[in-house]
Image: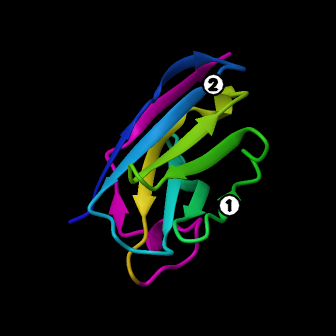
Amino acid sequence: QVHLVESGGGSVQAGGSLRLSCAAAGYTYSSKCLGWFRQAPGKEREGVAAIYTGGGSTYYADSVKGRFTISQDNAKNTVYLQMNSLKPEDTAMYYCAAQGWHGGSWYAPADFDYWGQGTQVTVSS
């Protein structure tokens, strides 16, 4: 059974940084995708960044390119999202997600089978 647990959210001022962590217990798929999504009140859930566990390829939404970095620690089965130069529009609940055997698009929530409980990120101006 796959169990994802996020941590590291919080409140920061614009321009600040946060690092989110996602501990992926029981996730044994190779060359599959782990991603970060976010959802602000009244908005759809959107893909922020993703990493493929095999080759380490990474993908980012245009809105976060150059500011966010996704990385993995295979020994700890943990994925990180380093968020720098945060903006008020980054405020949202952030979710870690993992794809199952069928794979899919890195940015489509429907293509992810496992989800964490979410961690809140609030950026004030």
Point 47% across, 42% down: residue: 94
The kind of residue on which mark 2 rests is Ser
Q: How is the image coloured?
A: rainbow
Q: Which residue lies furthest to the left in this view?
A: 1
**Splitting the image into 4 quarters, where does residue 102 fall?**
bottom left
Residue 25, image x, y percentages: 28, 55
The N terminus - image quarter: bottom left
The C terminus - image quarter: top right
Taking the image as shown, residue 37 lies to the left or right of residue 67, namely left
Q: Report the front residue among 84 and 47.
A: 84
Residue 85, image x, y percentages: 73, 27
Residue 69, image x, y percentages: 66, 44
Taking the image as shown, residue 27 lies to the left or right of residue 39, namely left
- Residue 32 seen anywhere in this rendered image of the structure: yes
Identify the magenta region.
102-125
**Splitting the image into 4 quarters, where does residue 84 fall?**
top right
Q: What residue is pinned by disc 1?
A: 59
Residue 106 lies within the magenta run: yes
Taking the image as shown, residue 87 lies to the left or right of residue 78, namely right
Q: What element carries label 2?
A: loop
- Residue 45 seen anywhere in this rendered image of the structure: no
The kind of residue on which mark 1 rests is Tyr
Q: Report the front residue among 70 and 73.
A: 73
